[in-house]
Amino acid sequence: MNEDQIKLEKDIIAEGLGLIAAEGYINNEGGQAIADAAADLMNKGCGTLLIDLDGTRIINSIGVSILLEIMEKLIEQEGRLAFCSLTPTISKTFEIMGLVQYATIFPDQESARLELEGHVTR
Amino acid sequence: MEVVLHLPVVPNVELVAAKAIEAVGGALGMPQSRVEAASVAIVEACLNAMEHGGGRMSVRVASEGGEGNSGRPRLVVEVEDHGRGFDPATAPRNTASQVLGCASKRGWGLTLIRELMDEVEIQSEPGQTIVRMCKYVENDS
């Protein structure tokens, strides 16, 4: 795929639990696309969001700063943000920028769903 | 091996520099996770150069060391711009505890570069800033 074009899929996978699968470059445009998808899912009653970054290999700090804004909005609403399928570098970047202090990181979507579907914030 | 790029300021041009990292890092046999770390670092350096550099930038990606050359095999990256420069000693160093509730979440570029690369050296004066970074092919553990 063209790496600079982000490909997004979003779905409500359980009551109160939204999934966003993102593949591609998370820059300002990619981050904003994820933020728009998150806002839509939150408006539909999802208090817990899982962002699956399988297929995302490169990010930048502007894109991650937009993910931080999503996290702030969820915290304001007493919701929860989780990520899965991160590369080691993306995981380290999230650690450096503080995302891992407030979001939960899962190794893959299967383990994330197993945990989150039983503890959904509505 | 050496790749030199003269890049215009256009959207996503930083990915061209990241591709050069992939090519040279791959030729060096660098593990994928280390290539990806260097790719994020060069992306951040290019974004800084585009934001503060006032025009086109130059990027050099090279393999150094190993097989009869001095030092451990490594990827060396230089990003040069021609902006007004800055004092690296007083550049902001963000910390994770600052992020929530802060109106501006920008300014992470140099922090990420320093954390993701093994060595970083910045030379800056009015008209020329060079960020020189190094990532060893293997970590030292």
Image (cartoon, coloured by chain):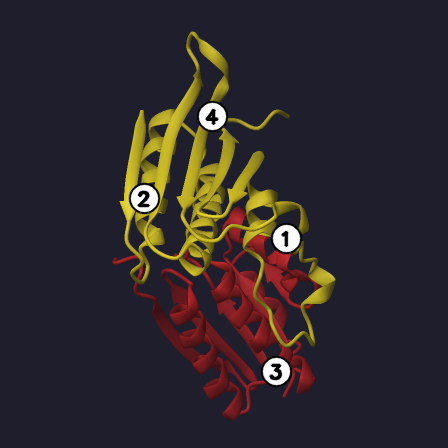
Chain colours: A red, B yellow
SS category of the residue bearing label 2: helix
Mark nearer the viewer, 3 or 4: 4
**Residue picked out by circle 3:** A73
Please tell me which of labels 2 and 4 falls first in the chain. 2
Quarter of the rendering containing residue B108: bottom right
Answer above or below: position of A15 versus B28: below
Q: Residues within 10 Å of mark 4 (few under 14, many from 20)?
A: many
Identify which residue is drawn at 29% across, 41% down: B5
Q: Residues within 10 Å of mark 2 (few under 14, many from 20)?
A: few
**Residue picked out by circle 1:** B91
Q: Tell me how far mark 2 sits from mark 1, CA to CA.
A: 28 Å
Q: Residues within 10 Å of mark 1 (few under 14, many from 20)?
A: few
Callouts 3 and 4 on one subunit: no
Residue A95: x, y in percent? Answer: 64, 55
SS category of the residue bearing label 4: strand
Viewer-nearest residue: A117 or B59: B59
Chain under callout 2:
B
Mark nearer the viewer, 2 or 1: 1
**Residue picked out by circle 4:** B74
Q: Amino acid at mark 3?
A: Lys
**Residue picked out by circle 2:** B19
Residue A56: x, y in percent? Answer: 41, 57
Q: Tell me how far mark 3 sits from mark 1, CA to CA.
A: 29 Å
Residue A46: x, y in percent? Answer: 55, 86
Chain under callout 3:
A
Residue A76: x, y in percent? Answer: 68, 85
Outermost residue to the left: A1
Chain under callout 1:
B
